[in-house]
Image (spheres, rainbow, N blue to C red):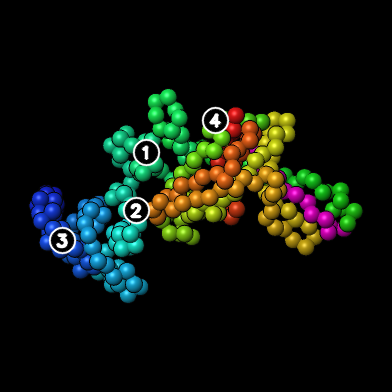
Amino acid sequence: MRKSLIALVFLAICPLLVAQQALNNDSVIKLVKAGLSDDLIVSTINASPGTYDTSADGIIALKTVGVSDRVIAAVVMKASGGVPAPAASVSTPDQVAANPDDPAAFHEAGIYVFSDSAPAGSKMTMLEPSIYTQGKTGGIFTSAMTYGIAKIKTNAVLRGAHSNFKVTDPQPVFYFYFEEQNAGLSHASSPFSGTSTPNEYTLLKFNIKGDTRETVIGKENVFGASGGTDDKAVTAFAYTKLRPGVYKVTLNAPLQPGEYGFISGSGSVNNRVFDFAKN
């Protein structure tokens, strides 16, 4: 009850405080020591002018006095002039219901396809991951004849000749939402875990083989194994960082009809591919 009262009083006087002076590291520390929630502090940082010390010493000083990582991230983002992160760290029914098709809204970690040509307006659709198996094909005979020098290709094999999800736009736009905001720090609690940037993914076109889809993901010979895709199967894309952990991905060229999928080059997503078909 006392904390709620403090929060209400703070909300009432916050505009006056902001008008008087810009926030800084000391201001953030005072807000934390006053017992305000991270949500309220992040919202205040996003909405207020500020001059912050984001050097290593400045960040360490904030951490030492108990400022949370999320608040520190908001300080760094504000100081760098980037797009503010949402105040809430977890989704609420109101957030999800209000903005499910807005790329700027909070979304669960994953890859989403954005379409603005739907009859009802813009639409965000999450790509559900599929599990692929690995099979060695191509070059087996040649490898045997060359005593293992020639390379054997390793394929990712997906069940079914076609993906359940289809896109009609020749150059669909994708949004990547990662669990963690800093590269290399994602954890492993979801199908989209263990990665933190689109640069760790490759968009590949699959070949239909009967009732399966296949694409080359590696090569090996007597000297060892290495990752390696078929250049003809790679679809190039570019990405823009919108805010920590959120990226907009655009294709460099229109897609040809066929079967496609985003695959992690690090293999850290447990043989999962985010597949879709282009009509």
The residue that appears at 51% across and 45% down in the rendered structure is: 250
Q: Earlier in the sequence, mark 4 or mark 1?
A: 1
Tag 2, which secondary structure? loop
On whether residue 152 falls in the magenta region, the answer is yes
For marks 2 and 3, give the CA distance. 27 Å
For marks 4 and 3, give the CA distance. 53 Å
Q: Earlier in the sequence, mark 2 or mark 1?
A: 2
Tell me the amino acid under the disc marked 1: Asp
For marks 4 and 1, give the CA distance. 20 Å
Tell me the amino acid under the disc marked 3: Ala
Tag 1, which secondary structure? loop
Main secondary structure type of the part rendered in magenta: strand
Q: Earlier in the sequence, mark 4 or mark 3?
A: 3
Image coordinates of residue 248 in percent, x first then y, are: 46, 47
Q: Please give the label number shown on residue 83.
A: 2
The residue that appears at 86% across and 48% down in the rendered structure is: 141
Residue at mark 4: 168
Crowdedness near tag 4: few (<14), some (14–19) or many (≥20) residues, C-alpha within 10 Å: few
Crowdedness near tag 1: few (<14), some (14–19) or many (≥20) residues, C-alpha within 10 Å: some
Start-end of magenta stretch: 147-159
The residue that appears at 69% across and 53% down in the rendered structure is: 228
